[in-house]
Image (cartoon, helix red, strand yellow):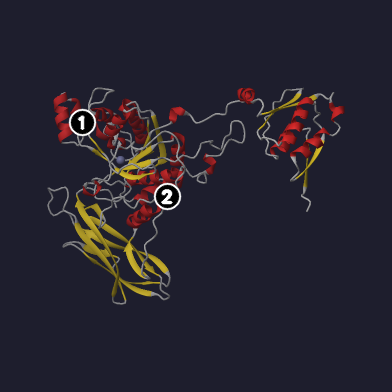
């Protein structure tokens, strides 16, 4: 079979280069106006016979302008024969070709090569912190000071600019408050010497529901930004809020920052994800393709935003904040508090009070009442380089890139044909832990939430009917005394082979004791029954509070 012919007219430099590249050769071409000179480097080691031809080529001036026909599969030597056809008469042409064999003059060629730009070392981080709002960094600054003492490079990403909430320092609200808070966060970190700080386009969202936060952040857009910053900063370790739903402040935005950081940990090393970020430039001053490289971080650790501590114990390293920094000669907690002084819009009254105190008073108040003296606890999300669960964050981390690691997803549990289970953020987190191989991530069982009373508790449910016929399902709630079902109980039909979203709404009473800020958590159960059998139960521990973020 005759292979299709391709022809190339070598009167253009690019054609000539292409011709050679097609043969697995790499020619670097130097253009000089008015004087055509090809200055090439051959990267292959040619067969002996081809070497002869190359040597011959070096000795012969060669006219550009010869039409060469190349057949696929043609031997390199044959190609050169084509080029040489009629070469004696080309001697006096105004163009010269000089070809150097890399194997004969490697040093000379290495010196002539023009260096390609590489990643900017100023933005290489050992630790990338990912949080939601300005002042969230305070959750981890005592550890960051220790890390700076150990000469670690730290970069911080805020997913929002914190443009909601009260302003204790001035009149600015909404977007203007975000403008102020961005500067406060930059100043707080600059106090510690951390200047590589970025803000994503997420919007401050008053919710406990991570799904609402992610929706309001334009999840895809912020994830793209997050992955880009991982590729830019090439962190060894990512530190972020624990993605989970707990009784606590449990801000939906805090959870969402942990979700985004985890997703970026698992995606940034994959060249097929946001490929425009890792594509090389196609032109000078390339305006679209970012020329970053994929990056696989080695470990991810979480800090929980939960009231309870029991389920996190022993799940990661702990650090005392009372040791004295070599950089400042102050305890780590004190440096963290100094940095926090930038957050006037969020804590002016507290900071003014501290400004009136002497050093001994500050230490007593900050370390005994305000939690600045407490050890910092982390939860190991995953390590791709080994090390022990509660060992140092940098245990087993050595310089250099590691290969991309596809997350090992945990298979979905088998379900009966007819089932009901808790939905909303709770079922999302179950999926999330499976998808990212975070089987060991602590989560409360039964799930829990703190809500304002009086108010409404919404219990989202998935009702799955994989049978071949429609099914009657009855939902009922078992509630603490004084709590009532407002909506969503009773009989429903779920069509054949359908999954339906249902929700039961419970009216929550006021707190029985008006002097208390919260009650003891109580259990709520929603039961789903069909054909006289229980097909699923959703349990929640619910704490009533005077104030809480909306569900
Ligand atoms: Zn926050």
Q: Which label was assigned to residue 164?
A: none
Of 353 and 401, the residue lying toward us: 401
Q: What residue does disc 2 label?
A: 407
Left or right, 308 with reference to 16: left
Image coordinates for residue 358, horizontal then vertical, percent: 15, 24
Image coordinates for residue 415, horizontal then vertical, percent: 36, 66
Please report contact status of discs 2 and 1: CB closer than 8 Å, yes or no. no
Q: What residue does disc 1 label?
A: 322
Could you tell me if residue 207 is visible in this image?
Answer: yes
Left or right, 178 with reference to 79: left
Crowding at dot 2, Cα within 10 Å, few <14 / some 14-19 / many 20+, comes out as: some
Q: For ligand 1, give the image quadrant.
A: top left
Q: Is residue 476 above or below residue 98?
A: below
* Secondary element type, mark 1: loop
Could you tell me if residue 175 is visible in this image?
Answer: no
Left or right, 80 with reference to 171: right
Image coordinates for residue 357, horizontal then vertical, percent: 16, 25
């Amino acid at each position: 079979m005759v292979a299709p012919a391709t022809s190339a007219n070598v009167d253009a430099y690019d054609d000539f280069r292409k011709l050679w590249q097609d043969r697995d050769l790499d020619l670097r071409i130097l253009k000089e106006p008015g004087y055509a000179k090809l200055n090439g480097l051959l990267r292959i080691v040619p067969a002996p016979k081809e070497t002869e031809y190359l040597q011959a080529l070096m000795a012969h001036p060669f006219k550009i302008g010869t039409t060469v026909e190349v057949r696929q599969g043609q031997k390199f030597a044959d190609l050169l024969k084509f080029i040489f056809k009629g070469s004696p008469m080309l001697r006096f042409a105004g163009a010269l070709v000089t070809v150097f064999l890399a194997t004969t003059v490697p040093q000379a060629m290495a010196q002539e090569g023009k260096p390609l730009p590489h990643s900017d070392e100023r933005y290489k981080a050992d630790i990338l912190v990912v949080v939601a709002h300005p002042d969230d960094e305070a959750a981890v600054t005592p550890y960051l000071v220790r890390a700076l003492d150990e000469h670690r490079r730290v970069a911080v990403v805020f997913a929002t600019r914190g443009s909601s909430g009260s302003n204790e320092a001035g009149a600015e609200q909404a977007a203007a408050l975000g403008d102020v808070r961005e500067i406060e966060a930059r100043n707080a970190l600059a106090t510690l010497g951390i200047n590589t700080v970025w803000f994503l386009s997420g919007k401050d969202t008053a919710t406990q529901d991570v799904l609402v936060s992610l929706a309001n952040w334009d999840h895809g857009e912020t994830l793209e930004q997050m992955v880009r910053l991982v590729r830019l900063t090439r962190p060894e370790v990512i530190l972020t809020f624990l993605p989970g739903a707990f009784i606590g402040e449990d801000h939906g935005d805090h959870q969402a920052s942990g979700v985004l950081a985890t997703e970026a940990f698992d995606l940034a090393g994959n060249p097929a994800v946001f490929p425009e970020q890792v594509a090389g430039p196609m032109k000078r001053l390339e305006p679209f393709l970012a020329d970053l490289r994929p990056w696989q971080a080695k470990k991810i650790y979480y800090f929980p935003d939960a009231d309870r501590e029991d389920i996190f114990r022993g799940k990661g390293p702990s650090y005392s904040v009372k040791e004295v920094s070599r950089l400042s000669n102050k305890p780590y907690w004190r440096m963290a508090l100094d940095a926090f002084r930038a957050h006037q819009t969020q804590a002016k009254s507290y900071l003014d009070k501290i400004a009136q105190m002497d050093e001994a008073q500050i230490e007593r108040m900050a370390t005994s009442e305000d939690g600045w003296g407490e050890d910092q606890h982390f939860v190991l999300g995953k390590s791709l380089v080994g090390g022990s669960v509660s060992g140092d964050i940098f245990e087993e981390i050595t310089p250099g890139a590691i290969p991309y690691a596809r997350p090992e997803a945990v298979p979905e549990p088998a379900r009966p044909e007819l089932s009901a289970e808790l939905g909303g953020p709770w079922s999302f987190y179950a999926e999330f832990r499976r998808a990212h191989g975070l089987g060991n991530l602590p989560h409360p069982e039964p799930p829990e939430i703190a809500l304002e009373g009086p108010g409404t508790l919404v219990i989202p449910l998935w009702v799955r009917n994989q049978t071949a016929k429609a099914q009657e399902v009855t939902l009922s709630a078992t509630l603490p005394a004084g709590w009532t079902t407002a909506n969503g109980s009773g009989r429903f039909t779920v069509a054949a082979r359908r999954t339906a979203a249902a929700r039961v709404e419970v009216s929550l009473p006021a707190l029985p004791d008006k002097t208390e800020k919260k009650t003891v958590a109580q259990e709520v159960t929603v039961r789903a029954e069909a054909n006289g059998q229980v097909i699923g139960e959703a349990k929640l521990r619910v704490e009533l509070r005077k104030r809480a973020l909306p569900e």
